[in-house]
Image: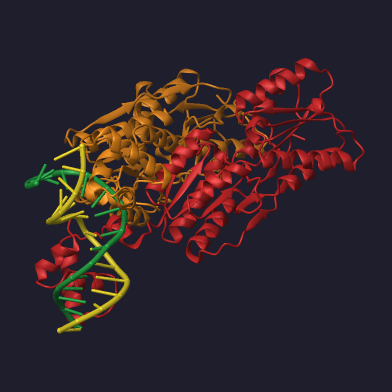
Chain colours: A orange, B red, C yellow, D green
Amino acid sequence: MSTLKDIAQELGISVMAVSKALNGKGGVSADTLVRIRNTAERLNYRPNAVAKSLRLNQTRTIGVVVSDSSLSFFAAVVKGIEDTAFLNGYNIILCNTDQDCAKERQSIQVLLSKRIDGLILAASMLTRKDDVEFLRSLGLPFVFLIRRSESEDVDWVINDNMLGAYQMVNYLIMSGSQKIHFINLYVETPSWKDRLAGYRKALDDHGIPYDPDLVFKVRPTIEDGQMAMNKILDGNADVNTVFCGCDVIGIGAMEAIIQRGLRIPENIRVAAYDDIDFAAYLRVPLTTVRQPKYAIGSKGTELLIEKITRRSDEVHHLVLTPELVIRMST
Amino acid sequence: MSTLKDIAQELGISVMAVSKALNGKGGVSADTLVRIRNTAERLNYRPNAVAKSLRLNQTRTIGVVVSDSSLSFFAAVVKGIEDTAFLNGYNIILCNTDQDCAKERQSIQVLLSKRIDGLILAASMLTRKDDVEFLRSLGLPFVFLIRRSESEDVDWVINDNMLGAYQMVNYLIMSGSQKIHFINLYVETPSWKDRLAGYRKALDDHGIPYDPDLVFKVRPTIEDGQMAMNKILDGNADVNTVFCGCDVIGIGAMEAIIQRGLRIPENIRVAAYDDIDFAAYLRVPLTTVRQPKYAIGSKGTELLIEKITRRSDEVHHLVLTPELVIRMST
DNA sequence: ATGAAAGCGCTAACAT
DNA sequence: ATGTTAGCGCTTTCAT
């Protein structure tokens, strides 16, 4: 792999001249410029971004930590991130946390070593107030995506979880449901609380008392959704409507219902959250709250790059509006 | 952000001593070792991987170019890659090519500038023989995943496309189908050809003549699958069985069939390829060929790291065995 | 227009 | 056990 020095020696000129020429900085005669370009081409010169990074103290690389990039929902967010990063001349280093707090911190430390210019935390486990101290101590611009922090003075891009849950539960009530089970996610993040608040507010607005026995917490897997639904069905003859914390849980719930020979929505109505790619093509097309997945990724990246470039300390909260998507399952 | 020098000055010792101590190289007294560690801790020292990379000529970073990381199938492969990279102390820079040859080359050039240690090409567009020259000219270990190259002398990890297609078509014939439409992917890659070969071989083995009019090419999207299926249904009253090049196309095909009030599998049998996460939970649970998605990613990464470490020039072809998964759609 | 010097943070090789 | 030298490839600053 050839270097500026190689080109300079080849031409009997200084390294500086070559550097300036190849970076279009001027201060080089038209004649030498051409000769330098040709030689660079011939020697198959590729600028060494590592050396550049060391010198300029910027890597044009963004760190992305996400709980599980293989889940349909996160994969869409990551695509939004990567596309936007690419458009702005950045690359992304992708790390999975597997919902493991320690692994998340470890990954962040590695990214820090690699001197990323900024950090995206997608569905982070570090949402507590004291986690923010740790994140701040890194001295690095960072943005929360999907899940917000409990601390108000950091940036985030999320969908309006309270509104989404409210809209869904309100719709379910308006269309006839009085008793609504809620299989929410198992980590009690701010998003989790916001959705619960939306659920409760909708009940409240319709004068339906809140029954904590109707609320469950499970991991976002088909199996767990199925198990939770089975438990609900086992314990209770009177199940009418189920609102699931994400589509994946909803798929498991539908599976449990169908396996018992019950029909959706005739016997039980099922609703969920996210609107993943295949939500419209499931056993029963799923009524759900659409999160603007790709936009969360792209807006979040724009915000981060803005922070990297401007270095301003304004706090930005982007709360994107979710959309109720009514399909056959209700 | 503090450096070795900061620690050295603080302690009034040389930079070298600090470097050795912090890297566990020995040659430091137990006493100074402790003092160095403490000071490093206190100054919140993080080794600068950029400087290390420049010095050592290795970044412990792998480049991953993939056609579209948001597609369920690729997302699973990428997870396999990232997990395995992490386990071996590597990070991945993820780039999407969007099936665009020029973008793929551009991304590779950028990765090359960033001095990645190795390159993974997942469903690359650079499968032609002359593309290999370009890839070799990079002087970088690389591995093809999912899609193989036309050139035999490069490494790859794929599933046995010929066998998978053969097994499926053989099963379809054995279970009663004589006329089988084939909606294959639109890029005529080696994988594409292998699957067509498997399709033809199965027909052959059963004495069924090959009819090119039954073979179609579409992009791997639900919409295109749907359009293709509609075209088939429009032009032909006698449609019995459809084998789709991937599950996403299969979803589109099923949608078209259902929208016409036809039943799956009673009126038309539908089979596909990949076995994406939700294949079992679709409108009609999908009969498909399971690719070992995660394993393709993890085995491919192991192979690449092996190449990075050993620098041997043996060629490895890992052809993983696909599995026929029979569900309700046939 | 061109170049020399210095240094980003680190480590291998070689003193002491 | 500890330190010195040199240099990875690049760019900023300051000559000429």
Q: Position of residue B248 (x, y in %)?
A: 62, 32
When asked about the image quadrant of residue B38, the answer is: bottom left
Name the residue nearer the viewer: A315 or B49: B49
Q: Position of residue B319 (x, y in %)?
A: 67, 54
Q: State the quadrant of the C terminus of chain B.
A: top right
Q: Tell me which residue sits at (20%, 61%) in the image.
A: B45
Residue A216 visible (yes or no):
no
When asked about the image quadrant of residue B162, the answer is: top right
Q: Position of residue A35 (x, y in %)?
A: 34, 39
Q: Is residue A101 left or right of residue B4?
A: right
Name the residue nearer the viewer: A35 or B302: A35
Q: Tell me which residue sits at (76%, 48%) in the image.
A: B163
Work out whether A248 lies above or below A48.
above
Q: Is residue A233 left or right of residue A12?
A: right
Work out whether B269 lies above or below A130.
above
Work out whether B43 lies above or below B19.
above
Q: State the quadrant of the N terminus of chain B.
A: bottom left
Residue B162 visible (yes or no):
yes
Name the residue nearer the viewer: B173 or B62: B62
Q: Position of residue B30 (x, y in %)?
A: 21, 81
